[in-house]
Amino acid sequence: MKPKLKALLILFIIVLALIPIYYINRVLKRTIRPRESTERFFLFIFANFFLVVVYTMTVVAIVVRLFPAK
């Protein structure tokens, strides 16, 4: 596979992975309501941090499985 095509496919996977995260973040905002108190704000920050770590690991695992190293 050509390097440019591979790079475009990886970029496409990342962009597709951003769509569900956007909606998950909207749901988190609605359920936690971080503007109401400091405790809720820190819970929202922690939940987003956890979401970023888990989702990054998932996307990296998908890309590694689809494009294994030579």
Image: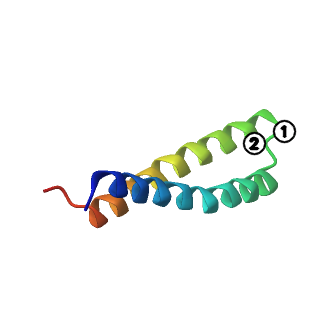
Q: Is residue 59 visible?
A: no
Across and down, in percent, residue 12 comes to: 49, 58
In the image, farthest residue toward the bottom: 66
Tell which of 22 and 38 is nearer to you: 22
Q: Are marks 1 and 2 in contact (CB under 8 Å)?
A: yes
Which sits earlier in the primary sequence, circle 1 or circle 2? 1
Q: Is residue 53 above or below residue 10?
A: above
43 relative to 30 in the view: left or right: left
Q: Which residue is mark 2?
A: 40
Q: Is residue 54 above or below residue 44?
A: below
Q: Is label 1 in a helix, a strand or a loop?
A: loop
Q: Is label 2 in a helix, a strand or a loop?
A: helix
- State how far apart marks 1 and 2 are (Cα): 7 Å
7 relative to 55 in the view: left or right: left
Q: Quadrant of residue 38?
A: top right
Q: Is residue 14 visible?
A: yes
Q: Quadrant of residue 19?
A: bottom right
Across and down, in percent, residue 39 comes to: 74, 37
The amino acid marked with disc number 1 is Arg
Q: Residue at x 61, y 46 (%)?
A: 48
11 relative to 35 in the view: left or right: left
Q: Residue at x 27, y 57 (%)?
A: 2
Colour convention of the picture:
rainbow
Q: Residue at x 82, y 37 (%)?
A: 37
Q: Quadrant of the C terminus?
A: bottom left
Q: Which residue is mark 1?
A: 35
In the image, farthest residue toward the top: 38
